[in-house]
Image (tube, rainbow, N blue to C red):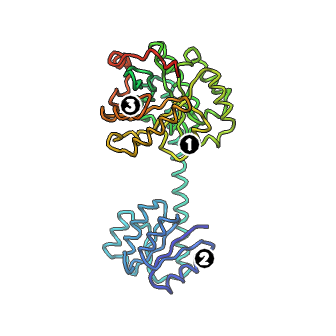
Amino acid sequence: MARILVVDDDAMTRRFQARALTRSGHEVAEASDGVTAVRLCTERSFALALVALQLPDLSGVEVLRRMRAAQPGCMRLLMAPEVDLPQVVGAVNQGEVNRVLDSVLSADLLLAAVEDLLRTRAAMQDVLRVQEEAASAEERQALLECLRSDAIRLALQPILDARTDGIFAFEALLRSRNLAFPGPLSVLRAAEKHRLLHEVADVVVQRVAAWMPQLPPPVHVFMNLHPDELGDSDALAARLSPLLPWSRRIVLEITERSRLQAIDQWEHAVDRLTEMGFSLAVDDLGAGHSSLAVLAELQPSFIKVDMSIVRGVDADPRKQRLINLLCRFADATQARFVAEGVETAAEAEVLRDCGAHLLQGYHFGRPSFEPEAHLARWGSTQALWAAR
């Protein structure tokens, strides 16, 4: 049946109500004061709350007001001896109370009121479900139209060689001109929700393929790879096939927060990618809980540390020691360490001293649809560390 919260400081009244509801098959939780009732609402969900007006701490109206904020779908029944109290009338008018009953009731009248409210709740949930399904279908269609148009673009942000200050690569960052999907996260969340990740990935590949002929041959491009794509190596290889002419210059970023162990055959997919000539990067190192495990399993060519570790590194000796250790690890494994989120010259200088190989951040340039300006400012790195 339903889970119901009964709140009354009068033990006899509370037990009477709880017993009647339990006998009708409902699951009942009890509270003798408003503070306890509010706490229970943060711990468990309820279909209906039956609350006395007079309580020793918070009033019944205040309890129901907080319940409405915490659990909007919970029906709120106030037990009050006088229904013409101004605060009760105001609470009803404002929608904080769904119904008011006299405190002195028979079990039959109480159960009738409860069942009536539960039927109302069920009807409201049905309406909400229909609305959500319609909104979901509309969102899916909007995303498909967005992907079929030129609304999805890739902005390029420079990644500089820390030794030469020449541009080693650009990171391709998802951008949307569709108002329904104002940022990359909104696009990705919708794609995950509607199982359209492959369609988004296809568009990203198309956009990267369009950028590659416009960039001088030494320059690499970093592009994000959703971890779910590693589950089907054949489909992934087919999707990336348009990029084969430039595979040696393309780095596929996999966020370290992904749980590779949950993806079947991911090792085979990684082997397939390296055979095709692509390089791999672990992204956002330090932002999750599985960093070392991913480094050991993936064996990336590039290690991108999260910007939370980079910010303020010039004033934090502990961060400097951590980055120095990570750079030494990168050297030992023939990987390249990329510091993201560099915003000041002081940060850049300390990162160079710590041994960072590549630097990325607003200090060197914001994402742009005109990479020529970045290339004109910094030039490109001609020698791609052939000695490494």
Judging from the image, what secondary structure is the residue with disc 1 in?
A: helix
Left-right relation of 279 to 82: right
Q: In which quadrant of the rendered view does residue 269 lie?
A: top right
Q: Position of residue 119 (x, y in %)?
A: 55, 63
Amino acid on which the number 2 mark rests in the picture: Thr
> Mark 2 to mark 3: distance in Å?
69 Å
Q: Which mark is residue 6?
A: none
342 and 146: which is toward the camera: 342
Above or below residue 241? Residue 280 is: below
Above or below residue 314? Residue 214 is: above
Judging from the image, what secondary structure is the residue with disc 3 in?
A: helix
286 and 351: which is toward the camera: 351
Q: Position of residue 377 (x, y in %)?
A: 32, 18
Label 2 packing within 10 angstroms: few (<14), some (14-19), many (20+): some
- Residue 200: tell me if it is visible: no
Above or below residue 164? Residue 185 is: below
Does the residue at mark 2 contact the one at mark 3 (Cβ under 8 Å)?
no
Mark 3 vs 1, N-terminal side: 1
Q: In which quadrant of the rendered view does residue 319 lie?
A: top left
Q: Position of residue 138 (x, y in %)?
A: 51, 37
Amino acid on which the number 3 mark rests in the picture: Arg
Does the residue at mark 1 contact the one at mark 2 (Cβ under 8 Å)?
no
247 and 168: which is toward the camera: 168
> Mark 3 to mark 1: distance in Å?
23 Å
Residue at (46%, 26%) from the top-left corner?
Answer: 172
Q: Which mark is residue 352?
A: 3
Label 1 packing within 10 angstroms: few (<14), some (14-19), many (20+): few
Residue at (32%, 30%) from the top-left corner?
Answer: 363
